[in-house]
Image (tube, grey):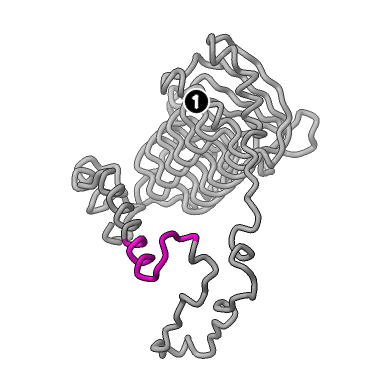
């Protein structure tokens, strides 16, 4: 990266942030370069620790006497800065300031464990299964581990459509349906937080409010921000409005939603997005592929759309309407 600040224009001169095949050829990097870089970082850290007489990073945590203030900074903004509290070291044994309590990551109790167990007929014999469970906002990345099991056994080909059909009721936590694999369908009766369908990989996601609700779907948020981020394949249907950055970097998913916030379809390279309602500002910024259909009943979409890389046109043909 040479900081040209043109990531959204598809004209990155070094071939990093672009889908242009000619420009992409200019990028000469390899995964091995990244691996080597981190090895070098680790080696330098090891050398610096050795100079100070330590062998491991854990040994210097909390040792603020190793830090020094730069007295040469004369900028007026630095006047009056007092770092004494940052350099204060409590009179306590080393263990008291280092890892006094383990983080709690109860991965054995996550909802996906139940899904995997109930989906065994599909995972082991490709037999269709239907699952119904409640869900809460502490259930994050629901579907990711299940999709991992599908990928282990069947690779990217996955399973036949709706082989694993899951109906959930409640409010889902972040990253609901992340990386959902082919053959897995999620229906959520309720609402979800940010990152729904992140990296969607062939599955289907349907989110709708309960049938007896008084909520007007077209006027209510049903999913959070950054929905379908980096999604590559599959379908998503949202009976309600989504937050900001809907379908950012979507490259192959078909999605229907009743409205989106700012920056919808940003950097999108493929797929189809249907917005049956209003959008926020800066729609389609950096969008270099795919198609977006927007119902512009108010008549102000042209003002909300970033026209740097896209064109607006009506949908006159019946074939387009049926798409």
168 part of magenta stretch: no
60 or 217: nearer the eye?
60
- Relative placement, left or right, of 151 versus 97 is left
Q: Which residues are magenta?
A: 44-58
Tell me where residue 232 appears, x and y as whole percent.
Answer: 43, 33
Q: Quadrant of the N terminus?
A: bottom left
Q: Which residue is mark 1?
A: 181
Tell me where residue 10 appears, x and y as whole percent.
Answer: 30, 49
Residue at image coords 23%, 44%: 24
Residue at image coords 61%, 62%: 95
Residue at image coords 46%, 44%: 248
Q: How many numbered marks, from 0 up?
A: 1
Residue 287 visible in the current orientation: yes
47 part of magenta stretch: yes
Residue at image coords 20%, 47%: 28
Residue 192 visible in the current orientation: no
Tell me where residue 311 appears, x and y as whole percent.
Answer: 37, 44
Q: Against 44, is 319 above or below?
A: above
Tell me where residue 129 sits by quadrant.
Answer: top right
Tell me where residue 208 appears, x and y as whole percent.
Answer: 67, 32
Q: Main secondary structure of the magenta part?
A: helix
314 or 125: nearer the eye?
125
Q: Against 301, is 269 above or below?
A: above
247 or 145: nearer the eye?
145
- Relative placement, left or right, of 270 versus 12 is right
């Amino acid at each position: 990266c040479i900081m040209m600040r043109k990531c959204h224009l598809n004209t990155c001169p070094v071939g990093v942030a672009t889908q242009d095949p000619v420009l992409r050829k200019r990028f000469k990097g390899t995964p091995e370069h990244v691996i080597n870089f981190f090895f070098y970082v680790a080696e330098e850290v090891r050398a610096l620790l050795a100079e100070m007489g330590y062998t491991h990073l854990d040994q210097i945590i909390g040792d603020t006497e190793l830090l020094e203030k730069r007295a040469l900074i004369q900028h007026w903004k630095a006047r009056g800065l007092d770092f004494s509290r940052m350099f204060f070291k409590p009179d306590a044994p080393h263990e008291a300031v280092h890892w006094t309590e383990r983080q709690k990551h109860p991965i054995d109790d996550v909802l996906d464990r139940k899904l995997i167990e109930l989906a065994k007929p599909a995972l082991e014999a490709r037999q269709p299964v239907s699952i119904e469970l409640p869900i809460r906002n502490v259930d994050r990345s629901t579907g990711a581990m299940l999709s991992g099991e599908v990928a282990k056994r069947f690779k990217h080909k996955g399973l036949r459509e709706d082989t694993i059909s899951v109906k959930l009721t409640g409010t889902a936590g972040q990253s609901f349906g992340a990386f959902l694999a082919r053959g897995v369908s999620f229906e959520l009766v309720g609402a979800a937080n940010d990152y729904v369908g992140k990296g969607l990989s062939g599955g289907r996601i349907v989110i709708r409010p309960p049938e007896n609700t008084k909520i007007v779907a077209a006027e209510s948020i049903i999913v959070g921000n950054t929905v379908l981020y980096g999604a590559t394949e599959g379908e998503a249907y949202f009976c309600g409005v989504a937050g900001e950055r809907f379908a950012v970097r979507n490259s192959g998913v078909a999605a229907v939603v009743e409205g989106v916030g700012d920056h919808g379809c940003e950097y999108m390279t493929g797929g189809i997005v249907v917005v049956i309602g209003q959008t926020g500002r800066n729609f389609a910024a950096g969008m270099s592929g795919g198609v977006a259909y927007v119902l512009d009943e108010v008549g102000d979409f042209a003002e909300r759309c970033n026209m740097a890389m896209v064109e607006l046109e009506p949908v006159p043909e019946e074939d387009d309407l049926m798409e």
